[in-house]
Image: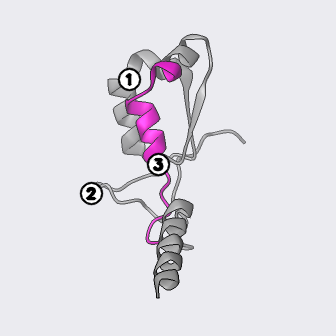
Amino acid sequence: MKTLLTVSSLIAVLITATGAGAESDDRGWQLKKLFSPTSQDLARAAAGRVFIFDGLRDTDVELAMQSEFERVGSMMFVRTRITDSSGALLQDKTGAYVTEDDDCD
């Protein structure tokens, strides 16, 4: 019984870690890096390094543009997910998240 409980707990952790479930949303650590950077993150940015944020919501990016303006030059946003007026992620007919067009054809 103890082994079954341990295995069940491990499976739950793995599902959460891999983003499986209702919304495959791996933005938590990116939001922390974006809005609460460590001193090392700030030093890297000051040295000219650029961090690429992948799959954040458009509302996250907009907030960063306003509140983290002095650091915008060391940020790049790709595959930004579009939200509706309630903040929910938009999905296309296939169920894939709608992302902003980067105009790079």
Give the residue type that dot 3 points to.
Arg
**What residue occupies the far left of the structure in this picture?**
86
Q: Is residue 33 above or below residue 71?
A: below
Of the numbered discs in the image, which one, if any, rests on residue 27?
3
- Residue 58's image quarter? top left
**Magenta stretch contains residue 61:** no
Q: CA distance from mark 3 to mark 2?
A: 18 Å
Q: Residue furthest bottom?
A: 1
Q: Position of residue 36 (x, y in %)?
A: 38, 30
The residue beneath circle 1 is 68
**Element on which disc 3 rests:** loop
What x and y, as percent, mark residue 105? 72, 42
Helix, strand, or loop for circle 1?
loop
Q: Which mark is residue 86?
A: 2
The residue shown at (38%, 31%) is 35
Image: 85 above or below 50: below
3 or 1: tag closer to the N-terminus = 3
Regarding residue 92, the answer to whether it shows in the image is no
Circle 3 or circle 1, nearest the eye: 3
- The span shown in magenta is 20-41
Q: Residue at image x 47%, y 82%?
A: 2
Q: Which three-letter amino acid code belongs to the residue tagged 2?
A: Ser
